[in-house]
Image (spheres, grey):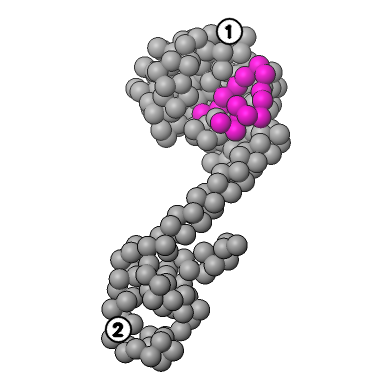
């Protein structure tokens, strides 16, 4: 185990943060031939090392003392945003793994991972990939599906509320524009001048907070698709 800095030679720096010598030694053994290794055993030392060394990779033991303080995992990430973090835990579970990915962790796995697995994880994470178990991926997909459903529902409600701000005539014009009608066609159908249609469109754009006909058409079409 070495206290060398990130500038030592050509090798990338990996910080190993664990109060358990067994874990620190195992992870160091897996990586020492290909990386510069710096080991810390508590939260304070981890903060100092991240802030000053800006390592390429952080191998973080979930059981590190006082890890939950100072903003928890998000606080650790803020100290060196460019550092890619792999979190090791004795008891991996899908919900924690999913939540860790959401705050920027790039790897989540068991502390009992073999030397070859640790080496592979670090290599893949350094290349920009993510390492998690299959169950964590399923949990993350479920979470994303639920979030997407909520966003769509909120968007629909928001769109309906915005359309309610239109007058009956403006709403009629908006729906005709949404169906692809030109200003001239709308004017003919409603027996008004094109100038009147343009004036209404200006008010419609302002009330719905859209900038052009395309966005107006998309909003109206989406609202019609979800209407009962």
How crowded pointer 1 is (Cα within 10 Å; few <14, some 14-19, many 20+) is rated as few
Q: Position of residue 69 (x, y in %)?
A: 43, 15
Q: Is residue 160 left or right of residue 202?
A: right
The front one of 69 and 39 is 69
Q: Is residue 116 left or right of residue 156?
A: right
Q: Residue at x 56, y 17 (%)?
A: 61
Residue 11 in view of the camera: no
Q: Position of residue 187 (x, y in %)?
A: 38, 88
Q: How many marks?
A: 2
| Residue 120 figure quarter | top right
Q: Position of residue 97 (x, y in %)?
A: 61, 29
- Locate the C terminus by quadrant: bottom right
Are the residues tagged 2 and 1 within 8 Å (C-beta)?
no
User: Of tags 2 and 1, which is closer to the observer?
Assistant: 2
The front one of 122 and 71 is 71
Q: Residue at x 41, y 87 (%)?
A: 190
What residue did someone put label 1 on?
21
Q: Is residue 68 above or below residue 21?
A: below
What residue did someone put label 2 on?
196
Q: Position of residue 154 (x, y in %)?
A: 50, 50
Residues in magenta, as a range:
85-99
Q: Residue at x 45, y 55 (%)?
A: 158
Q: Is residue 151 magenta?
A: no
Q: Is residue 189 above or below residue 143?
A: below
Tag shown at residue 191: none
Give SS at disc 1: helix
Q: Is residue 32 above or below residue 21?
A: below
């Amino acid at each position: 185990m070495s206290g060398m800095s990130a500038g030592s030679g050509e090798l990338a720096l990996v910080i190993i943060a664990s109060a358990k010598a067994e874990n620190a030694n195992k992870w160091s053994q897996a990586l020492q031939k290909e990386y510069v290794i710096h080991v810390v055993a508590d939260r304070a030392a981890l903060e100092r090392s991240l802030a000053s060394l800006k390592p390429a990779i952080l191998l973080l033991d979930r059981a590190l003392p006082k890890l939950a303080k100072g903003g928890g995992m998000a606080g650790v990430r803020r100290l060196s945003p460019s550092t890619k973090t792999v979190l090791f835990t004795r008891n991996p579970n899908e919900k924690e793994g999913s939540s860790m990915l959401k705050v920027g962790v790039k790897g989540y796995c068991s502390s009992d991972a073999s030397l070859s697995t640790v080496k592979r994880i670090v290599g893949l994470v350094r290349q920009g990939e993510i390492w998690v178990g299959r169950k964590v991926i399923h949990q993350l997909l479920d979470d994303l599906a639920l979030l997407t459903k909520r966003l769509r529902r909120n968007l629909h409600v928001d769109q309906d509320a915005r359309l309610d701000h239109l007058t009956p005539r403006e709403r009629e014009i908006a729906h005709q524009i949404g169906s692809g009608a030109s200003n001239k066609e709308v004017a003919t159908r409603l027996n008004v001048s094109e100038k009147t249609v343009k004036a209404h469109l200006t008010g419609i754009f302002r009330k719905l907070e859209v900038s052009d006909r395309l966005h107006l058409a998309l909003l109206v079409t989406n609202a019609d698709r979800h209407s009962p």
